Image: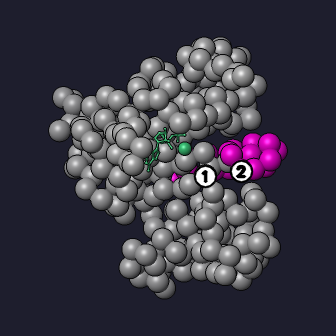
Amino acid sequence: MAPSGGVLPKVELRNVNMQYFGLEGETEALKDISFSVAPGEFIAIIGQSGCGKSTLLSLISGILRPTDGAVLVDGKAVSGPNRKVGYMLQQDYLFEWRTILENAVLGAEIQGADMRKARRRAKELLTRYGLGQFLDYLPRQLSGGMRQRVALARTLCTEPDVVLLDEPFSALDSQTRLALADEITDILRREGKTTILVTHDIGEAISMAARVIVLSRRPGQMKSDHPIAFASYDGRRPTTFEARNAPEFNRYFNTLWQELEVHVEG
Ligand code: ADP
Ligand code: MG
C-alpha cells in the first residue's frame, strides 16, 4: 500500500527479523528492521562486520526469507530471486574460463533471457565502461578495477530496477576504489536505479548515497537514518570527490563514526 499521498516505495522492509539456525544453535542476525526506499533513491547501510548487512541484502534479493516480517518490492512480497533486483557482491565471482563478454551475460543466461539481446546489451555496457577492447579476454588478464566493472555490467545487463551493492570495492586498492566509486555512482544515478549500498566505510557511504542508515552491532537493529545533503552545489548532487571535500563531509563523518561505536579490539 502506498503511504497516503506518497509514491509507492520501490523497496520496503516491515519489522524484519532474521535468525540463522545451525548445528551450533541459532544466530540472531537482524532485529526489527523497517525502512523504505523510494524509486531512484540511492541509500547506504553501514554497520560493523557481522552486524547483518549481507543478510539484509540477501533478504531483499529473495535468496533468503526473513524469520518474521515482510520484504516488499513494488509493494509485493518478495518470494524468491526476482529479475527486478540485481545483486553485486564483494568478490566479483567471474568465471575464469569464460571470456569477459560471456561473464557479462551470465545473469541473463541464468534467467533464460534472449541471448542475442543480452550479448548486444553486454557489449554496449562493457564498451561504455571502457572495456570494449577486452570482450574476448579472460578475467585474469584484467585488473581488479576492470573486473569489478565487468561485474557491474553483468548486474546491469539484466536491466534490474533495484541494484544491491555488497561492499563492492573492498577488494581494491584505495585509488582504484575511489575512482570506481565515482564511476559507479555516476552510472547508477544516471540510469535512475534504486540503489542500496552496504559498506563498513563511512566515507564511501557519505560520498555515494543520499541517505545513510546505521545498523547496531549484531543483532543488527536500526540505529539511525540520516539524509545526506550538500548545500554548496546548487541542488546538484556533487561527485564523490567533491563530496569528500565539502564542508559537510566531516560533520557527517563524525556523527556516523560515533554512532558506529568503533572500538579497536585487543
Ligand atoms: P555482515 O555482512 O554485516 O558482515 P552477515 O550478514 O554476513 O554480516 O552476518 C551476520 C551474522 O549472521 C554473523 O554473525 C554471521 O556469522 C551470521 N551468519 C551469516 N550467514 C550465516 C549462515 N548461513 N548460517 C549461520 N550464521 C550466519
Ligand atoms: Mg557482509
Which secondary structure dominates the residues rendered in magenta? helix
What residue is drawn where x is 52% and y is 62%? 155
Amino acid type shown at disc 2: Ala
Quadrant position of residue 91 = bottom right
Is residue 184 covered in magenta? yes
| Residue holding disc 2 | 171
Three-letter code, disc 1: Gln
Q: Please, is residue 200 above or below residue 89 in the view?
A: above
> Image height check: is 98 above or below 142?
below
Horizontal arrangement in the rendering, residue 50 relative to residue 254 (left or right): left
Along the line of sight, which residue is nearer the eye, 241 or 173? 173
What residue lies at 39% left-to-right and 49% top-to-bottom?
Answer: 23
- Residue 90: which disc? 1
Q: Which residues are magenta?
A: 170-195
| Residue plotted at (30% across, 35% down) | 16
Image quadrant of residue 221? top left
Q: Position of residue 223 (x, y in %)?
A: 44, 20
Q: Per the image, is 118 magenta?
A: no
- How many residues crowd around disc 1 within 10 Å: few (fewer than 14), some, or many (20 or more)? some
Say whether residue 44 is visible: no
Residue 122 in the image: x percent, y percent?
57, 73
Q: Disc 2 vs disc 1: Cβ atoms closer than 8 Å?
A: yes
Name the residue: 30% across, 59% down.
80
Give how far across and how far down residue 218 sits, in percent: 47, 29
| Mark 2 and mark 1: Cα distance apart in space | 7 Å
- In the rendered image, the quadrant that contains the N terminus is top left
For this orientation, the residue located farthest to the front is 24
Q: Quadrant of the C terminus?
A: top right
Work out whether residue 262 or residue 9 is closer to the camera in this orientation and state it: 262
Label 2 C-beta lies within 8 Å of the nearest ligand 2 atom: no
Q: Is mark 1 within 8 Å of ligand 2?
A: yes
